[in-house]
Amino acid sequence: MKNILLIMLFVLAVIQFIQPDRNQSGQAAILDISRIYPVPESVQGILRESCYDCHSDNTRYPWYSFSQPAAWWVSSHIRKGKSELNFNQFGSYSARRQRSKLKSIASSIKDPTMPLPSYTLIHRNALLSAKDRQLILQWTAKMISRSPNK
C-alpha cells in the first residue's frame, strides 16, 4: 500500500511538468465581434466576464488551472468552447455563420445552457442575472435583424 501511494505521488508530481499551451494571444483582436457589430459597453462587459474565458483567444486563468490534472480539464473546455464560437475571430466567419452564431448565443441564453454550470460553480461572477440575459437577448435580436440573410 505504501509503495502504491509513493508511485501515485511521484506520478502526480511528474505530471505537473506537462502543461498545456495557454490560450493567451496577447494581440489586439482585429476580427473581434466588437469590431464587426456595435456592442454596447454593458453587453461587452457581460461577454468578457461570462463568455470570453472559453470563447476567445485570451483566457484569464484561475489558480487551479496551473496544476494537473485540472489544467488539462480547463484546456479541454477552452478548446471545445473556441471550436463552437470564438468572439475574437467572429469577423472571419461568413455572414451566414455570424448570423447563425448570434442565433446560437440567443438560444444559449434563453435555455439557459451558457455559461456552463461547471464554470459558474467556481466563477460566481460569471453568473448571468435576468437583466444580463435580457440585455444580451435584446442585443442579439438587434444584430440578427441587421445581419444579411445570406
Image: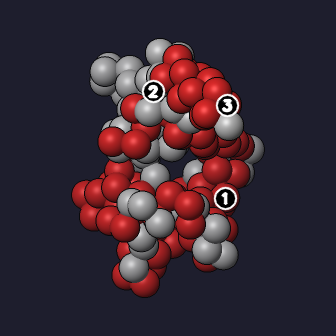
Residue at disc 2, secondary structure: loop
Instruction: Residue under label 2, please give it.
Output: 23
Indicate the quadrant containing the C terminus: top left, top right, bottom left or bottom right.
top right
Indicate the quadrant containing the N terminus: top left, top right, bottom left or bottom right.
top right
**Distance (Cα) linking label 3 and label 2:** 35 Å
Residue 145 % position (x, y): 58, 63
Instruction: Residue under label 3, please give it.
Output: 4
Question: Who is closer to the viewer here, 122 or 57?
Answer: 122
Q: How many residues crowd mark 1 within 10 Å: few (<14), some (14–19), many (20+)?
A: some
Instruction: Residue under label 1, please give it.
Output: 104
Q: Is residue 119 visible?
A: yes
Question: Who is closer to the viewer here, 60 or 101?
Answer: 60
Residue at disc 3, secondary structure: helix
Q: Nearer the viewer, mark 2 or mark 1?
A: 2
Q: Residue at x 31, y 21 (%)?
A: 26
Indicate the amino acid at tag 1.
Answer: Ser
- In the rendered picture of this protein, how many numbered marks are placed on residues? 3
Q: Is residue 141 left or right of residue 104?
A: left
Seen in the picture, residue 147 relative to 139 is either above or below; the reply is above
Q: How many residues crowd mark 3 within 10 Å: few (<14), some (14–19), many (20+)?
A: few
Q: How many residues crowd mark 2 within 10 Å: few (<14), some (14–19), many (20+)?
A: some
Q: Nearer the viewer, mark 3 or mark 1?
A: 3
Seen in the picture, residue 129 relative to 55 is either above or below; the reply is below
Q: Residue at x 39, y 60 (%)?
A: 123
Q: Earlier in the sequence, mark 3 or mark 1?
A: 3
Q: Earlier in the sequence, mark 3 or mark 2?
A: 3
Q: Earlier in the sequence, mark 2 or mark 1?
A: 2
Residue 27 % position (x, y): 32, 19
Q: Is residue 12 visible?
A: no
Indicate the amino acid at tag 3.
Answer: Ile
**Distance (Cα) linking label 2 and label 1:** 23 Å
Indicate the amino acid at tag 2.
Answer: Asn
